[in-house]
Image (spheres, rainbow, N blue to C red):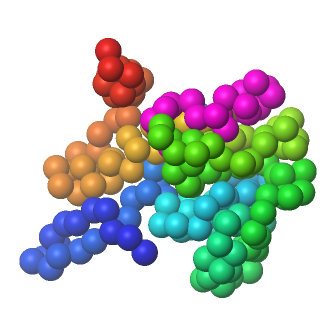
Amino acid sequence: GAVNTLWFEDSVLWGGNTDGYGFAANLDDHAPGWGVNGPAVVLGAGGASRAVIHALKERGIKDIRIVNRTLARAEELSRHFGPGVSAHGAVGELLADAGLLINTTALGMHGNEILAADPAGLPDHAIVTDLVYVPLETPLLAAARARGLKTVDGLGMLLHQAVPGFERWFGRKPEVSPELRSMIVADIEGH
C-alpha cells in the first residue's frame, strides 16, 4: 500500500499510512456507532479504498462490497482482504441493505464527472460518506442529505489522518477541533 507518513526510530527510517485512521476517526466524530450499521459499499478500488477497507475490517464489518468500473481491480482488493470482501462491477442492488456507502473515488470533486451512485436505494439508517472535500458537499452527499440520510464529508478524514504523523514528529497528539475545521473550511471556501 501507499505510505503517507515517515519517521525515524532507532536510526531506522519507517513508513506508514494514516488514511484508515483518518477515515475511522472522522466517522467516530460525525457518526458515532457507525461500525455496527450494517454492510458497507465502497465505491472505488484505488489506494484510498484499500485504507478504508482495512479500517472497516478492523471495526469488525463482515460484509464489505467493493464497486469499481474496472472489475479486475475490485477483485484484486477482494482477494487481498479475503473473506467478507466482495467485488462488483456496478452498484445494482447492493445498496438495498447497506448501512454505509463510501465514495473513495475522485468523482464528484470540482472538475470531475459526477458519481453514478444514487443513495435513494439505501435504507433509512444508512450513513453516506465521501472522501472528497472540495466541494465539502459533493453531489452524492447532497442527494443523501436530501433523502434524509446521515452524511459525513471528507474534510475530517484529511484532518484526522494528519494526527498520527504530527504525534510521531512532535511527541504530542493534536486535537482536531471545531475551530481547526472552521479555519480549513474558510480556506477551502475562499473566505
Q: Nearer the viewer, residue 171 or 27?
A: 27
Quadrant of the drawing holding the N terminus: bottom left
Image location (x, y in percent) of residue 77 = 61, 77
Q: Is residue 1 above or below residue 190?
A: below
Is 92 magenta? The answer is no
Q: Is residue 87 visible?
A: yes
Q: Nearer the viewer, residue 85 or 61?
A: 85
Residue at the far left: name it. 11
Image location (x, y in percent) of residue 125 = 82, 38
Total label count?
A: 0
Image location (x, y in percent) of residue 137 = 57, 30
Is 135 magenta? The answer is yes
Name the residue: 84% across, 38% down.
Answer: 120
Residue at the far top: name it. 191
Q: Nearer the viewer, residue 190 or 113?
A: 113
Q: Is residue 117 above or below residue 142?
A: below
Name the residue: 73% across, 57% down.
Answer: 41
Quadrant of the drawing holding the C terminus: top left
Q: Which residues are magenta?
A: 132-150
Report the side of 71 relative to 155 (left or right): right
Name the residue: 40% across, 44% down.
Answer: 158
Name the residue: 81% across, 28% down.
Answer: 147
Q: Is residue 72 above or below residue 135?
A: below
**Dividing the picture into quarters, in which one does residue 114 lie?**
top right
Image location (x, y in percent) of residue 40 = 73, 57
Report the side of 154 relative to 95 (left or right): left
Q: Nearer the viewer, residue 166 or 46?
A: 46
Q: Is residue 81 visible?
A: no
